Every structure is written in C-alpha cells, then in structure tokens.
Amino acid sequence: MSAQEEFFAGISKIPYVPNAGPADVMCFKHYNAEEVFMGKTMGDWLRFSVCYWHSFCGTGADPFGFQTLHRPWNEGTPMEAAKKRVRAAFEFFTKLGVKYYTFHDRDMAPEGSTLEESNRNLDEITDVALQLQNQTGVGVLWVTCNLFAHSRYMNGAATNPDCHVLAYAGAQVKKGLDIAKKLGAQNFVFWGGREGFHSILNSDVGAELKHMANFFKMAVQYKEKIGLNCQFLIEPKPKEPCKHQYDYDAMSVIAFLKHYDLEKHFKLNIEPNHTTLAGHSYEHDIVMASSFGMLGSVDSNTGSPDLGWDTDQFPMDIRNTTLVMKTIIEQGGIQPGGLNFDAKVRRESTDLVDLFIAHIGAMDAFARGLRNAVRIIQDGLLSGLVKERYSSYSHGLGQRVDDGSATLEDLEAYIKQNGEPKVTSGKQEKYETIFNHYI
Ligand code: XUL
Ligand code: CO
C-alpha cells in the first residue's frame, strides 16, 4: 500500500499490552488472540468481525441532523468512493487485527440504474476485495443484501404485495449468493427490515409469511445449485423500520422456520440491541437461540437500556459480554459465525481514531467476558448449583418425565403416595452474588 493511500497514518498494528494504564486506549489489555482457553485460542472463541456499513459508510446523519463524520475515503463519484472505501476498510481490519468483515451488497458498491449495472459495480469492487482478502488473510464472515433502503422496497421485499418487487429482491439475492461464493463468505444473512407491516388493515399476513418462506426456499435451492458452502442466518428484530416485523425475536423466527420446514437450513444471527427492542433482557435471545441449537452468530452491540431505540452502540458492558461468552462456550463455540460489531461510533465521536478506540474497547470487553466465563465454567460452582436444583429429574419419576415416558396417571399415583411437595428456595440473590464475584 503506497503512502498516499494510507488512511490511518500514524496508527500501526494494535498491540496487546496487558499492564497498560487506564488512559492508554490504543492497545488491548485483555484481548490476546493467541492465548488458549479450554482448548481454543481467544481468536477462535471470539471471531471478531468489523461491519462495513456503520464503520465505512456511516455519515453520522440522524433523523434530526446532517452528516457529522467526514471520512477521507467517501470522496469522489460513488464508484471512486467505493474503491477508496475498500482499501480503507482493509487497512483498518489489518491494523486492528480482526480476521473477518461483513457487508451489504450496496455498501460495497453503489446501486446502478439497472440490475445489470448494479451487478457490474459489485463485480468490479469485489474483484478488489478478493485481492485484498488474499493479500491480508481477512475473510468475509457474512454477506447480506440490502432489501430495505431503495424506495422499491418500501412495502417489503419478500413480503411485498406486488410480486414484481419480490422478483427484484430475488434477483438481488441471487447475485448476493454468487458474490458470497466468490469471496468465500462463511455465512449469509437475511435481515427483514421491511418484512412486516405498518397497518394490519392493508396487509394479508398469511400470504406475506408464505411468500417469505417460499423466497427462502428459492434461496436454499440456489445456494445448493451453485455449491455455496455457507450457513444461512436470519437476524430477528421486532420493529424499526416497520411497526411490526415478522422476524420479531428468536422464538418467533424459530417457530416460523419450523412451521415452513426450513429449520435445517438456517440459524439465527442475534443482535442484542434488537433483543432489548423486543422487550427482553440483553442476553435473552442469545440464550433462547442457543438452547434450540440455533445460535449461529452475534451482531455484537448494545442499545441504551433507558431508550427504546436501535442505537447500535459498541458493547462495553462486562456483565453482558460475560453472559454472551458463557452461552457461546457452553454450546462449544460460535463458528462458522462470529462476533460482528454491528455498531457505530456516536455521531459526536468525529475523529478517525475514535473508530479504533471503539473497536478496541469492545474487543477488550469481550475478551474480559471470555476470561470471566471460562472461570465461571471451570470453577463449576454455578453449574453445580443449577444441576442440584434440577436433580429430581435424574432418577425415578423425574427421569421418566425427562425422557418423555411418564403419564398423567403416573403423576397422580406419585402424588397420592408422596403428598405435598416441600417448597425450595430459588436463591436468585445467591446466584447473582456468585456471578458478580467473577466480573
Ligand atoms: C439493522 C441491522 C442490519 C443487519 C444487516 O438493525 O442490524 O444492519 O445486521 O442488514
Ligand atoms: Co445487525
């Protein structure tokens, strides 16, 4: 990379400096990619990914204010900017030391005036991305198609009342899958921002859900046809931009997938800011998806608990990262998914270096979460208490309830013989106090 092409001059590869002081925010104090925990390196447990849209396309504009972030790579014609952007992005990935990135088709290359032109733009810029991937070893965690920004999608993409629009979305996804194959993407995400409704009065919900399921089936067929070896992921979100989105939360998506016989082909990409928008606690959907064997990847971010918005902040809370990592370790890892920072610096954080500080801070928050979760799991105190709490299911009648062989008559006979159960304390505060010991 020649000197004038350097966008983050003066910043070199971010080092691990475990005993750095509190003011030193340009090094990792906890994230040490090569350190091994429970048989895997920290890098393999965490599989960090940087997202293109917030970090390289974001302008800081919000519904009340104009652009605040003026990035040197977003200058010139849309195609000139796309070429600079891809170079800036790879410089950032390698200096930060992450192995993965994520993007929407339209982040990578601008939409043209026809599908053919959009596809040519994408071909041209992904040629450069592929070259940079090969040079740096950075790969694609996931690709997705932007099926929500263009005005044609205002009434939905796969759930649009007009099949002409659905067809456009299908053509776009077909190309997205080709690009995923070209770049060796490990996952492909569907986020249905406009798949929902604003008014139930003008919506045929049954038809829309069926069309969305059939759309996914077409995507599965095409993926198999081209031999694309990647995991499909659906990203739940309850609202924003629609008043109601069909992929409301983890349980709604799992029920949808099972209803339409699609569950073998998909897992979930859980974004905690979406989980809290659905009225759940931060870790809720991570835990729910994982307990159904459906946690595929995480869009690692946070909202502000006091706001009902999707603010996409960098995850900095150690309690949250500890709970996420505990779940990920318990399911044996998140591969081929990862921890993608679907997060944006605040529109007031206008320095280029703030992009580094934000990612470093969040990576360190997850490294601490991993270290804490490993200690919780290896000590076995919490899991021992939980095991004991459910111990009545390990023998006798409980075991038969657990394996599904007990009947209501068996339960009645048991009560007639054993009478009233004695109450047992749930001891929530004890668990919380023990958890706090580790963070
Ligand atoms: C929107 C969101 C998206 C998806 C990809 O809230 O999270 O950026 O992750 O389309
Ligand atoms: Co997301």
Image (tube, grey):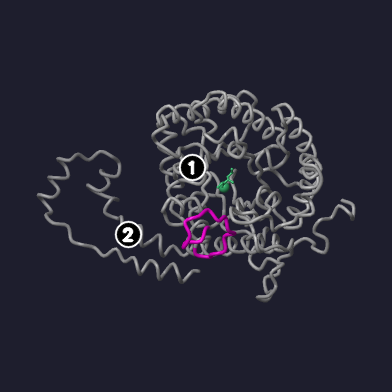
* Residue 81 forms part of the magenta stretch: no
Report how far apart the C-alphas of labels 1 and 2 lie in the structure. Answer: 45 Å
Dividing the picture into quadrants, the one containing residue 120 is top right
On the image, numbered disc 1 is attached to which residue?
242
Residue 40 seen in render: no
Assign the magenta stretch its main secondary structure: loop
* Highlighted magenta segment, given as a residue range: 303-319
The amino acid pointed to by label 2 is: Glu
Residue 438 position (above or below residue 307): below
- In the rendered image, residue 201, in percent from the top left (x then y), is placed at 39, 34
- In the rendered image, residue 140, in percent from the top left (x then y), is placed at 68, 43
Q: Residue at x 57, y 50 (%)?
A: 299
Furthest residue toward left: 416
* Residue 307 forms part of the magenta stretch: yes
Front residue of 405 and 431? 431
Residue 198 position (above or below residue 11): above
On the image, numbered disc 2 is attached to which residue?
388
Secondary element type, mark 1: loop
Dividing the picture into quadrants, the one containing residue 6 is bottom right
The amino acid pointed to by label 1 is: Cys
- N-terminal of the pair, mark 1 or mark 2, is 1
In-image side of 296 versus 413 (left or right) = right
Answer few, some or many: residues within 10 Å of disc 1's Cα (few below 14, many 20 plus, some between 14 and 19).
many
